[in-house]
Amino acid sequence: MATDREANLSATGTGVVADDTAARAGSSSRGSRGLARITVQRRVEWVDTDAAGHHHFSAPLLWVEQAESLLYDRLGIVDFIAASVPRVHFDIDYLARLKYREMFELTLMVERLGRSSLTYRFEIKASGELVARGSLVVVLTRRSDRKASPWPQQVRSILAQAGDQSQ
């Protein structure tokens, strides 16, 4: 499982895996193959809070993006992905509040891999309680003209088969 400190550090990626598989999420445990996923532990920092003393409504988007970046790093595709996957949809259900300095766990998992889109599902838990859940959709674009582009087979295989990248 990635730690708060590690979320800001580079990590080594995994090797390339073989072929493409179905692109619907299933459960995957640490060490097993399946759709790419990562769980990180973090603490609610001062900058994450609002005047009411709990997490600001926008903080989960940043936490999800940090987990996404760490996942790409661990998969060894961060240089390919960088600046090429704009967000096209984000939705979240807030179920509970997180207070300043409270520890939480965020799990980000590939749910669906389309031709050029990638849908993530995420859950945020604190002390075993589900705090928030939602999804993020990104689209791979060509750097030259920012148009949607199909995922290369090698990257599709990595996203579809890398399994749990938590350490």
Image (tube, helix red, strand yellow):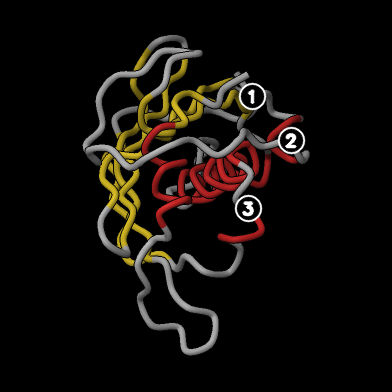
> Would you call the spot at circle 2 few (<14 residues within 10 Å), some (14-19), or many (20 or more)?
some
Q: Residue furthest bottom?
A: 145
Q: Residue tagged by mark 1?
A: 2
Determine the secondary structure under disc 1: loop
User: Which is more foreground, mark 2 or mark 1?
Assistant: 2
Give the residue at x 27% y 61%: 115
Tell me the kind of residue under disc 3.
Val
- CB contact under 8 Å: marks 2 and 1: yes
Q: Earlier in the sequence, mark 2 or mark 3?
A: 2
Q: Residue tagged by mark 3?
A: 78
> Would you call the spot at circle 3 few (<14 residues within 10 Å), some (14-19), or many (20 or more)?
some
**Cα distance between the residues tagged 2 and 3:** 10 Å
- Residue 161 at what x, y percent from top left? 40, 32
Determine the secondary structure under disc 2: loop
Residue situated in front as seen by the camera: 24 or 155 = 155
Relative placement, left or right, of 50 versus 45 is: left
Tell me the kind of residue under disc 1.
Ala
- Residue 59 at what x, y percent from top left? 51, 47
Residue situated in front as seen by the camera: 121 or 161 = 161
Tell me the kind of residue under disc 2.
Ala
Give the residue at x 55% y 26%: 165
Relative placement, left or right, of 161 versus 6 is: left
In this rendering, is residue 99 above or below 71? Answer: above
In this rendering, is residue 45 above or below 143? Answer: above
**Cα distance between the residues tagged 2 and 1:** 10 Å
In this rendering, is residue 48 above or below 149? Answer: above
